[in-house]
Image (spheres, rainbow, N blue to C red):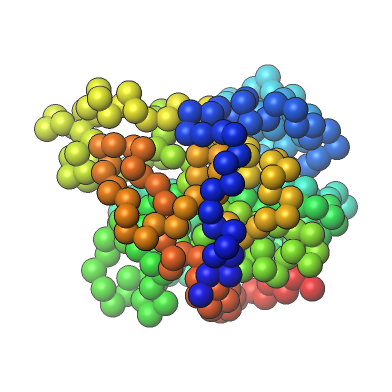
Amino acid sequence: MIQNKNLQNPIYSGFNAKSTSEDVIKGIDLSEKTVIITGGYAGIGLETTKILVLAGARVIVPARDIEKATKNLAGIQNIEIELLDLIDPNSIDAFAEKFISSGRKLDLLINNAGIMWVPLRRDSRGIESQLATNYLGQFHLTAKLWPALKKANGARVINVSSYGHQMSPFNFEDPNFENREYQTLLGYGQSKTASNLFAVELDSRGKAYNVRAYSLHPGSVYGTDLGREEPIELYKQMGTHDADGNIKPEVEAKLKTIPQGAATTIWCATSPLLDNIGGVYCENCDIAEIDHGQIEHRFDEPSTIRGVQYYSLDQENAKRLWEFSEEMIGIQFNVD
C-alpha cells in the first residue's frame, strides 16, 4: 500500500528537466535558515551549497575529505566545513553531537552524499558499502539530528536518491549479499529504494512535528565524479558509451548540466508548493509519476530515465525498513 498514492502525481510546478538551480531559487529567501548538506562540496552537492548560500542560508558541509572540501568551497561565504564519514558510525555520532550541542535549529537536512556501482566492500559492521553509505548513514545521521529538526518548526529532510531504485527492491532476507552473488547494480538499487522508503516513513512520523521528508532523482547528469569507479562495461551494455569506452556525443548532449541536476534538490528543499505535501518522490522539479510499466526506459535516452516504482513507496515496507534499520545499526530513532 502506498501511503501517498493520491499525492504521488505531478503538480505542474512550472519547472521542468531543463530548469536550473538558479531558476528554482528565484524569489526564495533563506535568511536565518540553517542547512546541513552531506557531500556539499562536489558535483550537484557543491552547486546546491552555492545556491543555498546565494539565497541567504547558513550552510554546514560535512565532508569525508576536508582538504578537497576546503579547496572546492574556497571563497564561498557563510559556510562551515566539518568532518563526517557516513560509513563510520562513530564519525556520524561525533558530528551530530557537536551540532546538537551548539543549540541551533536545523531547517534543512539534505542527505546528498552517496556512492555508486562500487566493488563489494563492507564497513566495520559487515554492512555492504552502498547500503551503509547511501541509506544507513543518512538514517543514522537524521536520527541523531532529529532534536534540531524538530526545533526548526518547519524543517525538511531531502534524500537525494536515484532512478537506480528501479534496479532492485530492498532485500530484507539478504541485504548484505551474504547468501547471494554480489551485483553492484542490485546493491545500488536497494540502497536507493531504502532511501525512498525512509522518506515515506520519516514524513509519516515527522509531520506531527512539522518536519516533512522527500526523496528525489536528480536526473542523468554529466560532469560529476559519482561514477568514478563504475566498470566501463556497464556503460557499454547500457548503450551510452562506444566500444572504446567513450561517451557517445549524442548521449552526452542530452544529459543534464550540474545546475540542472541540482534543481530538483533545491525545489524539494524550498518550494512552497510542497508545504502541505510530503513523503513523495520527485524528479525534474516536480512530483514524479508512478511507473506502471508504461515507460520504455533507455539509458541512451536520458529523458526516459524517470518514474518511481510502487515498491519504493510502499507504506508497510517503509515501516518494516525503519525497524529493520534500527536493528541493523543498533540505534533507536524515536521521533517523539
Residue at the far left: name it.
243
Residue 183 at what x, y percent from top left? 27, 61
Tell me the residue at 32%/23% (across/down): 253
Image quadrant of residue 244?
A: top left
Residue 159 in sight in this render: yes
Looking at the picture, tell me which residue is in the foreground, 136 or 311. 311
Tell me the residue at 38%/67% (across/down): 169
Query: How many numbered markers are drawn?
Result: 0
Tell me the residue at 75%/28% (across/down): 27
Residue 238 at what x, y percent from top left? 21, 43
Image quadrant of residue 322?
A: bottom right
Tell me the residue at 22%/27% (across/down): 248
Residue at the far top: name it.
75
Residue 21 at what x, y percent from top left? 59, 29
Looking at the picture, tell me which residue is in the foreground, 46 or 201. 201
Image quadrant of residue 200?
A: bottom right
Looking at the picture, tell me which residue is in the foreground, 299 or 120. 299
Residue 8 at what x, y percent from top left? 54, 57
* Up-down relation of residue 134 to residue 74 (above or below): below
Q: On the picture, is 259 further left or further right than 52?
A: left
Q: On the picture, is 122 further left or further right than 86?
A: left
Q: Quadrant of the C terminus?
A: bottom right
Residue 99 in sight in this render: no
* Up-down relation of residue 324 to residue 62 (above or below): below
